[in-house]
Amino acid sequence: MAGNGDRNYLDKTLQQFESYPYPDIPIEDPLNKDVEQLYKSSLVTARYRRDKKIITDLEDCAILDVACGTGATTLQLAWANPGAKIVGVDISPESVKIAEKRLRYHGFENTEFHVLAIADLNELNQKFDLINASDVLYLLPNLALTLKQLAQVLQPDGVLRGNLHSYYQRFNYYRAQTLFQRMGLMEDNPEETELGIARGFYAALRDEVNLKATTWSSDQEKIDNDQWILMNHLFQNDKGYTLPELFDALAQSDLALVDMVDWQKWDWRKLFKEPDNLPAYLAMGLENADREEQLCFYELVQPDKRLLDFWCSHPLPSKKDFSEYWLERPLEEIIVHLHPRVENFAPFRQAILDQGKLMPLNLSHCFPFIGQDSWLDRTLLTTLYAPLLESSQTLESLVSRFLRIRPFYPADLTPVRADEATKLMIGMIAEQEEWGLLMLEAEG
């Protein structure tokens, strides 16, 4: 855990994490198989989403893991950012000991750990290219102050990742926490007695009672798991937030929203049966709304995410509009890159190179973070992704490859014109760049 200036507020939280270090994951678990978590933990992803800058060398980059706990997120940051310096801080000495052992076990030497609170981060005498503040901000009494303190150690072009518990999605758990507070179970650090009372209470309730139906699991493994109950029903200082509250805190701390970390899953269009056939007032209102307003609309209509997982930074430069690339740049100057987490994902590479398969590939099966089905036929896969697995390509070379592989339309065998191939390739690249699989830059 990490804290800010109000030490007393965090006493209970510290006691809980000293008694039950979190997360309780074996040190031997490499934690490098989850492509979605590695993608979200990558500085490459965050910086490209911020300002469309492609970072190819992380050797001089420094990454801070705030509230590193037992080092699970720290290890994922190390895997996701090869070559970068990784620093972990936490106010729980017991958790820091485990985190140090975890990173050492997996061979990451360019790391350091400190028992340190957020208010004291300036003692590190260092600024960071990426700050990860996962599962901590919603436990602190003053969100805007905490964000200000983190901003002080963030590089001018750095990115801060944080997350907050969603008030709407977790509302029923807050009801449970309020109940257990009134029952006196959270006056001190919850221990075996309090856990037993909570289990007994739910066991005594009828299954159809609302609180049990909405907060208690039918999975016996979860019910037997102390940490699951502690992190939901008996969680000290837990607080839920709405997006307007987040945006207000960012404004107070002179930070700007980059985007939601899982931005692909915040598409308001996916909420409607016919997104291209909405009432005019609704379509115009949403299309013309700024990003924050669109996100607030989604949150109110579909509060389905436990965490409001976001990137922010110092005030943003104007983002590049890639429509300008297509209009103003020759095709040979537009460079297409695979995101490194896509490029290095072995199952995807094997699927692309498997010449014996003719069926389309659903990219969302390989990369669940895109949040929607994305079927590509084998021709388009071999046209676009196969060459990108070897190296970055110009748009011109990809169009030329497409014309060699598919020179005719299958239906009537009429020739495919170069301008038609260019339009098709641009559309496909633009879509997958927005999903986060591809990155673009212009030479010169």
Image: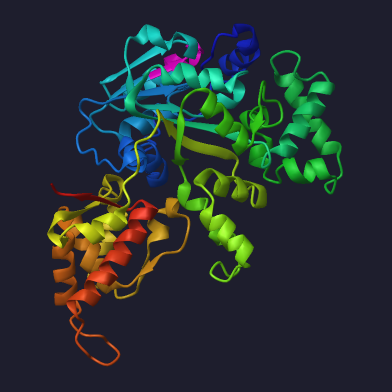
Expressed as whole percent of the image width and height from the top left, the position of residue 310 reads 48, 37
Q: Nearer the viewer, residue 89 or 245?
A: 245
Instruction: Say if the magenta span includes residue 91.
Output: yes
Residue drawn 41% across and 23% down? 65
Q: Quadrant of residue 385?
A: bottom left
Identify the residue at image location x=63%, y=67%.
279
* Image location of residue 416, percent across then percent down: 21, 82
Would you say 66 lies left or right of 235 here?
left
Region in magenta:
88-97
Is residue 50 shown above or below 347?
Answer: above
Q: Is residue 167 above or below residue 153?
A: below
The number of numbered discs placed on residues in the rendered structure image is 0
Q: Nearer the viewer, residue 48 or 51?
A: 51
- For this orientation, the residue located farthest to the bottom is 412
Q: Is residue 291 visible?
A: yes
Residue in view at x 32 percent, y 66 percent: 427
Q: Is residue 335 magenta?
A: no
Q: Position of 117 compared to 228: left or right?
A: left
